[in-house]
Image (cartoon, rainbow, N blue to C red):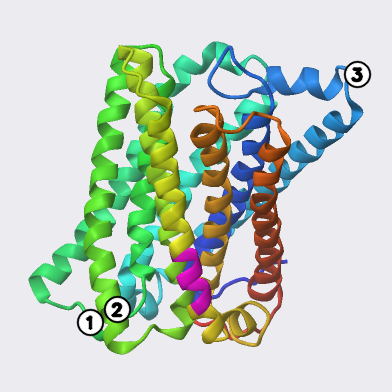
């Protein structure tokens, strides 16, 4: 059973546990998305998976598909379970003095973990519908307005949190620069990017120009807001880090740029697909090579810097396998998931489309190998944190 009734010991960063499970569910969807043929529609569905699973062809492929679907279901169930737990604990937390204190501190921005996770919930629900509901694509156009409304509702909730946060800072000048020595506040950009990429999906795939335009405009709005805040937060964050040194328990936040880059990168690709779909505005295949390589390069840079700093601070030994506990450690899951996901986009859009690598070739699977290793290492870390932070009783859980 999960720990319960944390009250003042609770932190909104625990929503990252549900977020990580949802991200892992989506990551397993990426395998059939890129490895199974689905030329008739832009994404793989039950109607592509079921024949490959039961058609009596290659038994190894059938077994792998079965394992993949089981993994999607496992992490999706875990996501919804942890989402329900977080919503219940968050409700209790809001009745404590610790919550009122949070509203007057830098940590208020951590509330953005709530809309971030809710946006992931919509993505997980869409993945479950795609892989487990027969003939879903025949009614998908009816689902797009609902998806837009859901992401917009989450976006409005996120903007309300941001509005209250920045209003307090601007009016009362309560921002503490000395305690800003991490990139943890960038969870707000993460949330806005998650909303932007969700809205970009109907913009990329709908056959109705009105739906396409509405989704694209809203996606561009949230992505633009995310990019603006990214520039501000990364400058302020690095300035504080260089002045005061990084806060040890928030060292994992150095990797938060990786999922933000993944989401903004996929958003851009979806915008390109939507423009091509509606207006025939197709670029040169090497454009995707340049763009995806740029994103992956930045992710590798932040990955190496973050790893070096966390290793120096014994972060992995203390907060993953050691005695120290902090809800923010769940932020380690998102970069691993994000690097795997965009790595697959890099291979398939950046290398296969311009015909630099043959789809299904030995080079193709060789390039996939390190991504798979990152994914399974992320799963290992996730379950270690899950057991350490959420299953063991009497833990003195530190607020993030």
**Is residue 241 magenta-colored?**
no
- Between residues 363 and 41, which one lies in front from this camera angle? 363
Residue 214 locus on image (x, y percent): 28, 24
Q: CA distance from mark 3 to mark 2?
A: 58 Å
Q: Earlier in the sequence, mark 3 or mark 2?
A: 3
Residue 361 locus on image (x, y percent): 71, 32
Left or right relative to 190: residue 393: right
Q: Residue furthest front?
A: 356
Residue 290 locus on image (x, y percent): 39, 40
Residue on which the image places disc 1: 176
Asked if 236 appears above or below 65 in the picture, the reply is below
**Within-10-Å neighbours for mark 1: few <14, some 14–19, many 20+:** few
Using the rendered image of the protein, determine whether residue 59 is visible from the camera's viewpoint. yes
Disc on res. 258:
none
For the residues bearing labels 3 and 2, Cβ distance under 8 angstroms: no
For the residues bearing labels 1 and 2, Cβ distance under 8 angstroms: yes
For the residues bearing labels 3 and 1, Cβ distance under 8 angstroms: no
Quarter of the picture containing the N terminus is: bottom right
Disc on res. 56:
3
**Within-10-Å neighbours for mark 3: few <14, some 14–19, many 20+:** few
Principal secondary structure, stretch drawn in magenta: helix
Disc on res. 180:
2
Q: How many marks?
A: 3
Q: Earlier in the sequence, mark 3 or mark 1?
A: 3
Residue 166 locus on image (x, y percent): 18, 64
Residue at 55% from the left image edge and 75% from the top image edge: 6
Using the rendered image of the protein, determine whether residue 92 is visible from the camera's viewpoint. no
Asked if 375 appears above or below 233 in the picture, the reply is above
Q: Which residues are magenta?
A: 302-308
Asked if 31 appears above or below 400 in the picture, the reply is above
């Amino acid at each position: 059973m999960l720990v319960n009734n944390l009250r003042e010991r609770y932190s909104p960063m625990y929503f990252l546990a549900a977020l990580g499970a949802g991200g892992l569910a989506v990551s397993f969807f990426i395998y059939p998305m890129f490895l199974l043929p689905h030329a008739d529609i832009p994404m793989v569905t039950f109607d592509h998976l079921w024949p490959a699973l039961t058609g009596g062809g290659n038994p190894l492929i059938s077994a792998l598909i079965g394992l993949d679907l089981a993994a999607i279901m496992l992490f999706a169930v875990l996501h919804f379970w942890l989402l329900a737990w977080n919503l219940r604990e968050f409700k209790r937390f809001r009745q404590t003095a610790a919550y009122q204190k949070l509203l007057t501190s830098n940590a208020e921005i951590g509330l953005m973990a709530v809309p971030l996770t809710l946006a992931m919930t919509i993505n997980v629900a869409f993945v479950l519908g795609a892989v487990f509901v027969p003939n879903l694509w025949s009614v998908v156009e009816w689902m797009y307005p609902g998806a837009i409304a859901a992401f917009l509702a989450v976006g409005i909730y996120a903007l309300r949190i941001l509005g209250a946060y920045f209003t307090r800072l601007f009016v009362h000048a309560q921002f503490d620069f000395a305690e800003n020595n991490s990139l943890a506040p960038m969870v707000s950009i993460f949330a806005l990017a998650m909303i932007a990429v969700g809205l970009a999906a109907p913009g990329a795939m709908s056959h109705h120009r009105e739906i396409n335009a509405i989704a694209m405009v809203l996606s561009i709005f949230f992505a633009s807001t995310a990019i603006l805040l990214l520039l501000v937060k990364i400058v302020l964050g690095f300035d504080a880090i260089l002045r005061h040194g990084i806060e040890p328990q928030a060292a994992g936040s150095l990797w938060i740029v990786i999922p933000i880059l993944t989401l903004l990168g996929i958003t851009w690709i979806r915008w390109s697909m939507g423009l091509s779909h509606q207006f025939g505005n197709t670029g040169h295949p090497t454009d995707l090579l340049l763009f995806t390589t740029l994103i992956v390069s930045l992710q590798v840079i932040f990955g190496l810097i973050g790893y070096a700093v966390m290793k120096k601070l014994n972060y992995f030994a203390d907060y993953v396998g050691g005695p120290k506990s902090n809800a923010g450690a769940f932020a380690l899951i998102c970069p691993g998931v994000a690097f795997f996901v965009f790595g697959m986009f890099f291979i398939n859009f950046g290398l296969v489309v311009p015909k630099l690598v043959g789809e299904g070739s030995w080079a193709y699977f060789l390039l996939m190998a390190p991504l798979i290793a990152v994914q399974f290492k992320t799963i290992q870390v996730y379950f270690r944190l899950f057991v350490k932070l959420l299953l063991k009783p009497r833990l003195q859980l530190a607020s993030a």
